[in-house]
Image (spheres, rainbow, N blue to C red):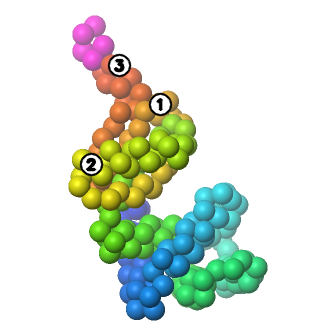
């Protein structure tokens, strides 16, 4: 999985960098980021759409046609729409999630923010996310943007990754450590 993520990152980085440079040059960084967040939410909410984008069986032209229809109905920023058409035309829609993630990193870095990946057993409330962001801001000394993920297998607690640092307070990890400790004793 890590190797696949690395390959996707290598594919995504030039696309995200090009869009970032274009959005910054057009003074539309916030609008483009919002548009990409909307697309990302659509991918996350619809498993069928996500599978459709990643499917190697469906041709790039068919994906581009479907995406064009979706963009026609949605009121997407023209810069985002054109960018998505280019990505579709180049057959890179399978890497769209990673492209959006890299773009968000670039935009956050430009604002002086740090991005933290937070995985929890259940979705965090706005109050919980706000408190976590404030705690991380106090610890790291700069504004923190949270990318939230849900993994029910954690049972409870959180996994927070900031750069190369990982804070794991999940019950799953604690139970695994107890299991290992018990094997060593008995």
The span shown in magenta is 181-186
What secondary structure is marked by label 1?
Answer: loop
What secondary structure is marked by label 2?
Answer: helix
Distance of mark 3 from mark 2, alpha carbons? 34 Å
Q: Residue at x 50, y 43 (%)?
A: 127
Q: Earlier in the sequence, mark 3 or mark 2?
A: 2
Left or right of 95 on screen, residue 53: right
Q: Can residue 184 be found in the magenta stretch?
A: yes
Identify the mark at residue 138; answer none if there is no mark. Answer: 2
* Residue behind mark 1: 156
Quarter of the figure with the C terminus: top left
Crowd around label 1: few <14 · some 14–19 · many ≥20 (10 Å): some
> Which x, y percent locates residue 137?
30, 52
- The quarter of the picture where residue 66 lies is bottom right
* Residue behind mark 3: 179
Distance of mark 1 from mark 2, alpha carbons? 24 Å
Q: Earlier in the sequence, mark 1 or mark 2?
A: 2
């Amino acid at each position: 999985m890590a190797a696949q993520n690395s390959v996707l990152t290598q594919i995504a980085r030039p696309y995200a960098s090009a869009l970032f440079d274009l959005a910054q040059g057009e003074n539309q960084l916030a609008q483009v980021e919002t548009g990409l967040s909307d697309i990302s939410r659509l991918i996350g909410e619809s498993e069928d759409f996500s599978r459709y984008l990643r499917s190697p069986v469906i041709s790039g032209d068919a994906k581009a046609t479907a995406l064009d229809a979706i963009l026609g109905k949605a009121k997407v920023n023209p810069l985002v729409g054109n960018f998505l058409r280019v990505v579709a035309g180049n057959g890179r829609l399978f890497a769209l999630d990673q492209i959006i993630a890299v773009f968000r990193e670039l935009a956050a870095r430009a604002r002086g923010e740090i991005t933290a990946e937070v995985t929890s057993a259940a979705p965090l409330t706005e109050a919980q996310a706000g408190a976590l962001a404030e705690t991380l801001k106090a610890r790291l000394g700069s504004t923190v943007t949270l990318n939230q993920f849900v993994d029910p297998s954690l049972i409870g607690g959180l996994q927070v990754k900031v750069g190369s640092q990982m804070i794991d307070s999940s019950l799953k990890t604690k139970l695994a450590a107890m299991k290992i400790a018990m094997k060593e004793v008995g």
